[in-house]
Amino acid sequence: MSDIAGYARYAVDLVNSAAGPGGRDELTEPTDVLRLLREDADSFASRVGVHEVVALRAFRDRFRAVFTRAAAGQHAAAADELNGILALAQFRPELTNHEGNGWHMHLSRGRASVTGIYVATAAMGLLVHVAAGGLDRLGVCHGDGCCRVFIDVSTNHSRRYCSPRCSTRASVAAFRARQRA
């Protein structure tokens, strides 16, 4: 699968920022945007402000809709939502060979906003992932009280939980319920 598919984690991280530990929203100030940007944070630190927080929170809701619709089997609606995000992202792919690492595709950053760059990166990552594996690979955790999203990369399409922690919690709860019965 393309390296660009790895950028789908940007979409997962953005959506899951709404449901941090204890249900705390993890996208409330500019430093939270820098945390989402990971290795690119230093490049954009001077350009991140409250406006980026507001804009990313709006896109966060749209990305969540992609995952929830896909998980509900509403694949056409999920695809429409992802296509809508891509249309708003305003990017263009370009072929580059920076640092002599071989020719590969990058998303042109140009004069785009930090939000535009983040959203384009996340949307292209999801697009490549979905094109290679299908919309049924996008999921919402089945854990009680958990609403985090994930991309199922298991060989048998069986993932139901966002993390081993949620899976273990569900297994323990089911075991205890059986013991009570």
Image (cartoon, rainbow, N blue to C red):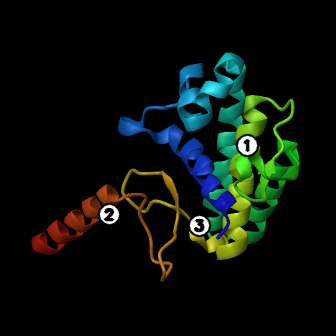
Closer to the chain start, of discs 2 and 3, is 3
State which mark lies toward you, 2 or 1. Answer: 1
Distance CA(mark 2)–CA(mark 3): 17 Å
Distance CA(mark 1)–CA(mark 3): 21 Å
Residue 13 or residue 141, whichever sits in front: 13
**Residue 111 location, x and y as percent?**
86, 29
Q: Residue at position x 56%, y 36% from top? A: 39
Above or below, 101 relative to 173: above
Q: Is residue 117 left or right of residue 16?
A: right
> Which three-letter amino acid code belongs to the residue tagged 3?
Ala
> Which three-letter amino acid code belongs to the residue tagged 2?
Ser
Q: Residue at position x 50%, y 78% from top? A: 157
Instruction: Judge the density around disc 2: few (<14), some (14-19), many (≥20) Cα neighbours within 10 Å.
Output: some
Distance CA(mark 2)–CA(mark 1): 29 Å
Label 3: which residue? 71
**Residue 138 location, x and y as percent?**
59, 65
Quadrant of the rendered image containing residue 89? top right
Is residue 53 visible in the rendered image? The answer is no
Label 2: which residue? 167
Label 1: which residue? 119
